[in-house]
């Protein structure tokens, strides 16, 4: 298997700050570690107040991981304090029946059977809040299920452009991945299978019944399996396993509407139509735009499969939803048997193999233990850490020639990467705000960042002496760090070491260091701001169009005019991004994705 290097992008970072970047870089630090896993015994609150009544208001104020951990820890302690308020346990008989329906591993069964909220429950809950906000921002409540599914799928394809991530292992091999939905959204790109994952998670918050479509044996194939397909870009080709499935579907009555995540559109036929007349879609499968590898023969064998998060199957989440769905509008529990029963015959089986990347346990396999997961592959490096590090824009590592001192190089790279990370990674970041429908906050944030990076470029432009000052800084850095080495290894006296360290500190105040950081971060930072601002304007236009399409006669003219204005704003924003798209040359698929969205905005603006 061959693939291009994974594209740099703006990775997700938890509230913990930039500590994980220290795995490979000497980045800026100072932030605390993520909160420890939930410890019900350590957060006990002796109170007669109904804990469910206090949890709702608490989670209305903040839905971040730390708050979800704390709230669930308190619930575990408080609901266990009195006999009548204990969390509903699962009996061995019920667990066995569930495992017969959903192929749970031993770890899955332990998670489902836990008598209190677990550390991974907090991560799952926080992710559900994220998707709840995204679902609300779509503005599709009250529409028929088919229209809700259409708009949800289109949103997924706008937010996640196609590019598969293959991480490089220590032996040089490339390992395909399939990450959990919110990690994919925060990253902004993914494979066709990862688009399916995001659609499944978003549909859960919309109360839509959705499924995966593959061959009869797809349920036995892990996420990293299936035929190898090719993702082609302007100057990059990446080859990666497709996954077991070639479509995703949404139940509409007694039929299933189908979507192709690679083309980003619905199929021209439903699942029932494929089963009764497979030839009706022959042209669709033979079209060169079909990169999934699915064939007319696959259409004849089309089989539906169900996939749900393991944590959604627990009695804890059923109880949580029963008490708090009204307050929080959150869907966290899934009745596997009832879900299966709602689908037409033949009833779909559940997909959950032994693979770590399967949808049901992808989050638990991906996140490290301190973030509510259980990622244990330390011999290959923690997947989450690598995911973060490989998404730092490569410009952050481009340092001037002649800088020989590794400690100085590490510090410069850390500062440049930290500049971009602070702008686009630390929550709440602009991409997250756009996806959660916080458009005004996102726009203000992006504009401020755009101006900041533009100032850096202006410093480089107006000062014609920058190359000389950078060269002088590099030479000076080599000298002062050499003096520190001599003080430590030869002179070995505290005054000599202190004097050398003071010289280093003074040297970092020279403008050459700032110019190096500007040169490494400002151009790509400005381009990222332009892209996110265009995406923000585009989502506002999509929302305005939904409102115009649903308008009553009395409001139709006004809402159509608002939609036209919003589309014109989106078109202008995409045109602005075109000026900076060159800085995103290392992001395979992003320029093409922006161009496609720009064309959509232009088409609507002309109507």
Image (cartoon, rainbow, N blue to C red):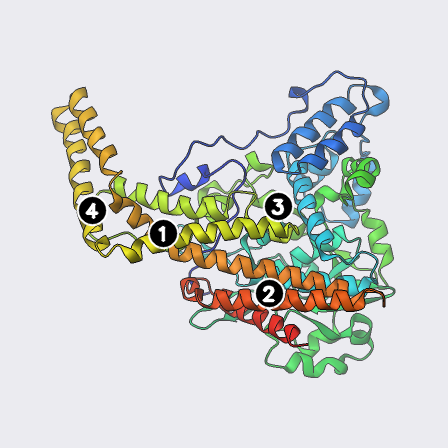
Work out whether residue 94 or residue 57 is closer to the camera in this orientation and state it.
Answer: 57
Tell me whether the residue at label 1 lies in contact with that at label 2, contact meaning CB atoms closer than 8 angstroms. no
Lower position in the chain sequence, tag 4 or tag 1: 1
Q: Nearer the viewer, mark 3 or mark 1?
A: 1
Q: Nearer the viewer, mark 4 or mark 1?
A: 1
**Residue visible at 81% across and 17% down in the picture:** 48
Give the side of residue 147 with respect to residue 539, left or right: right
Instruction: Report helix, strand or loop for mark 4.
Output: helix
Instruction: Report helix, strand or loop for mark 2.
Output: helix
Please name the residue that numbered disc 3 is placed on: 363
Instruction: Report helix, strand or loop for mark 3.
Output: helix
Lower position in the chain sequence, tag 3 or tag 1: 3
Tell me whether the residue at label 4 lies in contact with that at label 3, contact meaning CB atoms closer than 8 angstroms. no
What whole-number distance in Å separates the C-alpha atoms at marks 3 and 1? 38 Å
- Which numbered marker is on residue 569? 2
Lower position in the chain sequence, tag 3 or tag 2: 3
| Residue 342 in the image, given as x and y percentages of width and height | 86, 57
- Which numbered marker is on residue 474? 4
Q: Is residue 355 above or below residue 581?
A: above
Q: Nearer the viewer, mark 4 or mark 2?
A: 2
Please name the residue that numbered disc 1 is placed on: 456
Give the side of residue 441 with respect to residue 575, left or right: right
Instruction: Give neighbour class at mark 4: few <14, some 14-19, many 20+ (Cα, 10 Å).
Output: many
Q: Quadrant of residue 533?
A: bottom right
């Amino acid at each position: 298997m061959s693939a291009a290097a994974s594209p740099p992008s703006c990775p997700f970072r938890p509230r913990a700050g930039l500590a994980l970047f220290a795995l490979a870089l000497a980045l800026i630090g100072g932030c605390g570690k993520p909160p420890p896993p939930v410890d019900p015994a350590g957060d006990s609150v002796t109170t007669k107040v109904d804990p469910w009544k206090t949890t709702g208001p608490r989670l209305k104020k903040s839905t971040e991981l730390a708050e979800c951990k704390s709230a669930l820890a308190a619930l575990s302690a408080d609901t266990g304090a009195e006999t009548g308020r204990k969390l509903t346990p699962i009996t061995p008989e019920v667990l066995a029946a569930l495992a017969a329906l959903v192929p749970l591993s031993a770890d899955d069964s332990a998670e489902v059977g836990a008598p209190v909220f677990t550390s991974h429950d907090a991560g799952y809950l926080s992710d559900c809040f994220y998707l709840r906000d995204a679902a609300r921002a779509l503005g599709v409540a009250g529409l028929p299920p088919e229209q809700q599914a259409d708009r949800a799928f289109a949103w997924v394809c706008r937010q996640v452009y196609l590019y598969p991530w293959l991480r490089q292992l220590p032996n040089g091999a490339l390992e395909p991945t399939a990450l959990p939905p919110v990690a994919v959204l925060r990253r902004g790109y993914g494979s066709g299978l990862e688009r399916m994952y995001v659609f499944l998670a978003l549909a859960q918050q919309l109360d839509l019944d959705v499924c995966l479509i593959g061959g009869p044996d797809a349920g036995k194939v892990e996420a990293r399996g299936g035929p190898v397909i090719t993702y082609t870009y302007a100057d990059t080709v990446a080859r990666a396993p497709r996954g077991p499935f070639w479509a995703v579907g949404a139940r509409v009555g007694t039929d299933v509407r189908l979507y192709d995540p690679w083309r980003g559109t619905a199929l021209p036929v439903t699942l029932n139509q494929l089963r009764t007349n497979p030839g009706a879609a022959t042209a669709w499968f033979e079209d060169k735009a079909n990169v999934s590898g699915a064939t007319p023969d696959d259409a004849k064998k089309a089989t539906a499969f169900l996939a749900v998060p393991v944590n959604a199957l627990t009695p804890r989440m059923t109880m949580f939803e029963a008490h708090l769905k009204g307050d929080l509008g959150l869907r966290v529990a899934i009745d596997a048997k009832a879900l299966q029963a709602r689908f037409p015959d033949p009833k779909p089986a559940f997909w959950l193999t032994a693979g770590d990347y399967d949808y049901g346990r992808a989050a638990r396999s991906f996140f490290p233990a301190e973030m509510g997961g259980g990622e244990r592959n330390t011999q290959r490096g923690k997947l989450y850490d690598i995911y973060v590090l490989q998404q730092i824009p490569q410009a952050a590592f481009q340092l001037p020639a002649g800088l020989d001192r590794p400690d100085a190089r590490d510090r410069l790279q850390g500062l440049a990467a930290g500049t971009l990370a602070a702008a686009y990674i630390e929550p709440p970041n602009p991409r997250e705000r756009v996806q959660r429908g916080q458009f005004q906050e996102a726009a203000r944030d992006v504009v401020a960042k755009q101006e900041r990076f533009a100032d850096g470029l202006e410093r480089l432009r107006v000062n014609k002496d920058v190359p000389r000052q950078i060269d002088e800084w590099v030479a000076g850095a080599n000298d002062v760090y050499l003096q520190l080495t001599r003080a430590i290894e030869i002179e070995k006296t505290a005054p000599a070491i202190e004097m050398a360290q003071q010289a280093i500190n003074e040297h970092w105040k020279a403008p050459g260091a700032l110019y190096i950081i500007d040169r490494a971060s400002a151009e790509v930072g400005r381009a990222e701001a332009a892209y996110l601002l265009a995406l923000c304007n585009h989502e506002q236009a999509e929302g305005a169009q939904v409102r115009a399409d649903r308008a009553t006669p009395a409001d139709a003219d006004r809402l159509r005019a608002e939609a036209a204005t919003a589309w014109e704003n989106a078109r202008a924003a995409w045109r602005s991004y075109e000026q900076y798209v060159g800085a995103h040359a290392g992001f395979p698929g992003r320029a093409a994705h922006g161009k496609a969205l720009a064309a959509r905005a232009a088409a609507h603006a002309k109507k």
